[in-house]
Image (cartoon, coloured by chain):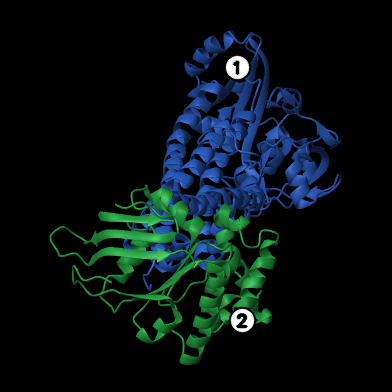
Chain colours: A blue, B green
Amino acid sequence: MNWIHLALKSLWNRRVTALLTLLMVSVSVCLLLSVDRVRTDTRSSFGNTLSGTDLLIGSRTGSLNLLLYSVFRIGNATNNISWQSYQELKNHKDVKWTIPISLGDSHKGYRVVGTNESYLQHYQYGRQHGLKLQQGVWFADVFEVVLGAEVARQLNYQLGDAVVIAHGTGSTSFEQHDDRPFKVVGILAPTGTPVDKSLHIPLEGITVLHVDWQSGVKRQGKTTSVDDTLSLDLTPDSITAFLVGMNSRLKAFGFQRQVNEFRKEPLMAVIPGAALQELWQLIGIAENALMAVSVMVIVTGLIGMVTVIISSLNERRREIAIFRALGAKRNTLLGLLMVESGFYGLAGLVTGYGLHVLLMGIANSHVQNRYGIELTIGWPNESMMVILSSFLVTTVILGLLPGYRAYRQSLSDGLSANV
Amino acid sequence: MQNMASDDALKVRDLRFSWDTQTADILNIKNLDIPMGRSLFIHGPSGSGKSTLLNLLSGVLSVQHGSIQLLGKEFSSLRAAKRDKLRADHIGYIFQQFNLLPYLSVLDNVTLPTKISTQRRQGKARHARALTEEAEHWLAQLQVPRSVFSQPVSRLSVGQQQRVAAARALIGSPEIIIADEPTSALDQQNIDNFMTVLTQQCRSIGSSLLFVSHDMQLAGFFDATYDLHPSTPGEQE
């Protein structure tokens, strides 16, 4: 219809204001889309990190804390598990497999995980995906390291490269274990989990790193040569945590109780799903707050849009008088302004979506590196589609407000107003 | 009241109007007829209620008392939307100034009425012509130079703008042209020129011209004159 064309031309005539209004609407749409996307991506990222593991066991702490440091490599353990306790629990009749994990060192900001070959055999993520080596082999010797996919990619390491591991977990740790470099023997296939950001070395390797170190400080004037070191007993004194697979899932509860009542040291066992649930509850509060804020921003955007249109009516009295003289009815004016507000809605959705995609694209690598969450780009899900369509309908309906105002104004101005 | 002769473009009977019931009528017209194809000069100094009259005649305002007939049909009692439709179909309107939409070219401004009214698109006088062609015809008739046809209206002089507005009023050959002091912003030479072409062209398509001005000197261009007195009830033509 020609009125649509006319309404858009008129809008183009006011393009600076229109552009800023459009920007306001699209930023609010972008915020809503992005918050929702980050929310679902966070959930799926956390939910996909671990599968097939029945219990997580570590020293006594909060179950969420145990989950975060042992699986997501977020935060640090408060205490370790002694090697004896580990051996005792590992040999329990109901336990099928365990993956020991020893944390506390890093390489250029990436966590170093001391473990053994059951990590490769039993660790599962997503829907029961096992780990696969993309290149090389799993470590077989003390000074060998297997890199997560992202570590290799970001730091551009190849098989055979030497890697120096630092004490502590900062990315610029001063305490480099530079006397004992590790050789890259394998690189894991990407998983989209914190495994990608880890360097895996043998438990014995962790022990070796800390020979001559006491309480996190290198002992002055004492250096043990590499050969001498290797001749020492490299059985670790302790590990940070371990993952457990049971012979039968039903046994998990019984074993969990046994671990929690373990006499020799304070330990705790948590079911990953339960700990994750705790995480959802925690995140849920933040999520809801963020969603509430973005809905408020949408509402603010809509109010702003109506304000801009209404305040533009005064300078458009001439235009409206001309339309009226040409025979524009009340419904024509309503339609004109609904086209205008609907245009803001539609264009706001399109550009808001574009902005959102751009934002996700830019933020992705940073968020991936920093938090291990992969931001995805895709069409909004069904419930978001419903929200977006009602947003669009609302913008069109809101055009009625300035529309009625324009009509009333045109009645009082009449045709001969010299405005 | 009497039998409706359909040879009147507009017929006004006992028209009274006041903005609220307490105050005196600002308009009181017993009889006013504009025959088809004739031109009428309405002399109205400021405060004589001429704006109100024009808004009533063009159907923007609702009639409170009395009646207006448009082309032999009762007009004033129709619903607002109906009157709007009749205005689009049968009335070409020229404002005092600022007639044109700044974001449309000269040609697009002229063809505007034909986009709103089917009747004016089919225009009885030159139905065979394409719209642009008809717009160009009217612009040429009103002596608007061809070089400005596709230019933005801001490039035009005031005189040219008023002639473009006249072309817009004439396109599609509506039965009635209403002009509200269209010459007030023009200099004397432009006024004469404008008046000549406007009255000529209205005559050529048989449209009635209703022209309001306070400038009595223009009365000579018209078939008849009506004096609109400021709030003096009972004093008519």
Residue A249 lies in quadrant: top right
Q: Nearer the viewer, mark 2 or mark 1?
A: 2
Query: From this viewpoint, is residue A414 visible?
Result: no
Task: Indicate whether A188 appears above or below B174.
Answer: above
Query: From this viewpoint, is residue A84 visible?
Result: yes
Chain bearing tag 1 is: A
Q: Are marks 2 and 1 in contact (CB under 8 Å)?
A: no
Q: Could you say where residue A376 lies in the image, as x and y percent from the top left?
A: 65, 41
Q: Nearer the viewer, residue B192 or A185?
A: B192
What residue is rendered at 48% in x and 50% in y?
Answer: A335
Q: Secondary structure at mark 1?
A: helix
Chain bearing tag 2 is: B
The residue that disc 1 covers is A89
Q: What's the residue type where badge 1 is placed?
A: Leu
What residue is rendered at 37% in x and 55% in y?
Answer: B69
The disc placed on residue B143 is 2
Residue B226 lies in quadrant: bottom left
